Image (cartoon, rainbow, N blue to C red):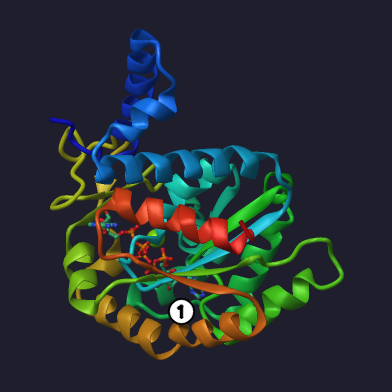
Amino acid sequence: MHVAPTTWPEMMGENRKLELEARKLKIGRLRLIRRLPSCARYRLVEWRRNDAFSRSFHRRRKVNIILIGAQGSGKGTQAEMLSKSLGIRHVASGDLFRKAISEGTALGMQAKTYIDRGHLVPDALTNAMVLNRLEEPDCKAGVLLDGFPRNIAQAEALDNDLQGTDRTIDGAIYLEVPRDVLLQRLSGRYICRANQHVYNINTRPPKVAGVCDIDGSELYQRSDDQGRAVQERLDTFFHETIRLLDYYKQYHKLVAVNGNQSIEQVHEDLMKAARSLAGE
Ligand code: AP5
Ligand code: MG
């Protein structure tokens, strides 16, 4: 019996297998695909559409997408995959702050006092840091913004900064996840020292405990994932950051994606959302 592939690498394998099988039977791939059960056919067609879209996306210029989601909704996890699929730079304000803290810079030391308590870092510091980052050459082809903007003042600062330039925000994607699931995810999260790759002891464990699969660096639990800071951050999101949804609905485009599904399914839905923001 044919089993529908569920993960991205499985899907790539499935696509390759079909090509080989069609060649062996000396029939076209399409004829072979028509013989598959409907759920397998649907997933394969979707995969092929997303794959074709990623390829055309790589050739485009200056695509700028904002990922909005509560703490633990999977912004970092998904942005890593999505930015690779779309060939654009992942810029995460939280990662920039953590890098500054680990390097012991003045910005890092200032930001640390807010981050450890689960508070937002003041807009003046945050805006300057992120807007400067966007000026760097590797961001010119487009960016996937994760964690910025986080309030209306930051969104306005970003729009003002882009005014008069040849860059625009194509739209925002909201990753929606219920609060109880967020708490569960944050309590099991570990990230790596070298590059902040994200793991979860319950849902996405590393191959070797305590070691990053990708760069071999040590895994640690973020200081703001412990104690009172977690609730503070979620409160800030649901009272303040959530207002960005109306902002992006009003001035740009907004697409919502259900983030309470498997990592692979969320990725697939995010690709669809990116397609719709790009007008395809
Ligand atoms: P930041 O680093 O941005 O943290 P955050 O917004 O609190 O978001 P998280 O990183 O906690 O969540 P995420 O959505 O990335 O989830 P993840 O993919 O890791 O900011 C840190 C601090 O910096 C802020 O509190 C603030 O002080 C400051 N700051 C940053 N930006 C700022 C700004 N603009 N203004 C002012 N201050 C700012 O996933 C979470 C876990 O879930 C992982 O373990 C993952 O493996 C797991 N997971 C992910 N997806 C799934 C899934 N589909 N199923 C099961 N498990 C999953
Ligand atoms: Mg993150």
Q: Is the C terminus in the top left, top right, bottom left or bottom right quadrant?
A: bottom right
Three-letter amino acid code of the residue under disc 1: Leu
Q: Quadrant of ligand 2?
A: bottom left
Whether residue 249 is visible to the viewer of this picture, yes or no, is yes
Which residue is at a point 19% across and 70% down the rendered structure image? 181
Q: Which residue is mark 1?
A: 120
Q: Which residue occupies the foreground of this view, 113 or 254? A: 254
Please, is residue 59 above or below residue 118 in the view?
above
Q: Which residue occupies the foreground of this view, 166 or 46? A: 46
Which residue is at a point 24% across and 36% down the rendered structure image? 211
Please, is residue 51 above or below residue 245 in the view?
above
Whether residue 195 is visible to the viewer of this picture, yes or no, is no
- In the image, residue 207 lies at what x, y percent? 19, 33
Which residue is at a point 70% across and 61% down the rendered structure image? 132
Q: Is residue 69 left or right of residue 105?
A: left
Which residue is at a point 57% across and 82% down the rendered structure image? 249
Query: Hey, which quadrant is residue 30 in on the image?
Result: top left
Please, is residue 176 above or below residue 63 in the view?
below
